[in-house]
Amino acid sequence: MSARYPTTITPTQTRIGWVGIGVMGSAMASRLLSAGYSVTVYDRTPSKAAPLQSKGAHLAPSVADLARASDVVFTMLGHPSDVRQIVLENLVPSLNPNGVIIDHTSSHPTLAKQIYDSALERHCHSVDAPVSGGDIGARDGKLAILAGGDEDVVKWLKPLFDEMGRVTYVGGPGKGQHCKIANQITAGANLLGLSEGLVFADKAGLDKLKFVEAVRGGAAGSMVMELFGDRMIKKDFKPGGVAEYMVKDLGMGVDVGEEEGGEVVVLPGAALTKQLFASMVANGGGKLGTQGLISVIEKINGS
């Protein structure tokens, strides 16, 4: 490996920092702890750290202290505004020489490029690496990890990514975020189609479980069906990815073209899906899992 990356990534040598330990972040950090890595965590709600501390994690009093105690810092936050404040304004300036930021937040491509440039000025590295696969994928180490930045850096960090899922290098800085937006457009359409299919099946008098079993091996089958079909039927809306974040992600599909001065892509399906998720949020379901979209379709149909 290039002299830019002198230290091999191993549990005995690589100190990990993790900021943002909600449903996804906690499950992902837990997998690194199970692999033997030393992990220091930070969250604005320190009590969230207790389950990870019981597995051996250390709790940092601030993001700056966490950065100074880490070689590689992961972040899994909520909104681009959180990423700007915590990553760009606090973590990057506190990184050790040759340190690394890996941002797993679904955030804005332009912000990812700004973080990359700021890290580079400090002779550090940044990878935007949003994920797909929900809480089950995070728990089982089967996430799709969409990495943007320098390809050599992504290859260097692969032992860490391998603990959490399968990493795919998709291009330069910001491209991981572009890929996640495209992923959310696709997943949102699948969630809407599955919701409508289940509501139709129910209205037609079909057993919904038998409906899913009958079609899952055909063209209607999808990872969305595998992850969320049973949950929708059982009205289990416990969150992995939450509805309010889907509104944010789908909204960025329009913002990206406008903010980067490029052509705005016309996305009628994504616009409709965003509107339906926004309805879910407006009715108090913003913190529910994205599979809760079926409740909006049921309400429209008087169910």
Image (spheres, grey):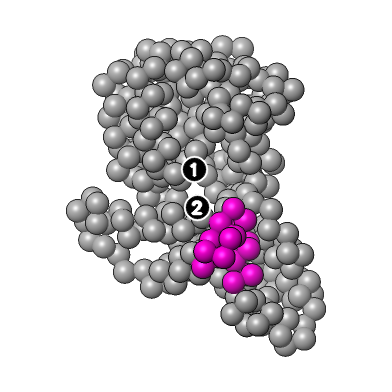
Residue 35 in picture, x, y percent from top left: 67, 24
- Name the quadrant of the C terminus: bottom right
Check the image and name the residue furthest to the bottom. 204
Q: Residues within 10 Å of mark 2 (few under 14, many from 20)?
A: many
In which quarter of the view is residue 207 placed?
bottom right
Residue position for label 2: 245
Residue 116 appears in the picture as rendered: yes
Give the residue type at disc 2: Tyr
**Picture quadrant of residue 37:** top right
- Disc 1 element: loop
Q: Is residue 222 above or below residue 72?
A: below
Examine the structure image and report whether residue 289 is included in the region drawn in magenta.
Answer: yes
Determine if the magenta segment contains residue 277: no
Q: Name the spot of residue 248 as percent of width and height, x first.
A: 44, 54
x 57%, y 65%: residue: 283
Q: Position of residue 200 (x, y in %)?
A: 66, 82
Q: Which residue is mark 1?
A: 78
> Which stretch is magenta?
279-296
The type of residue carrying mark 1 is Gly
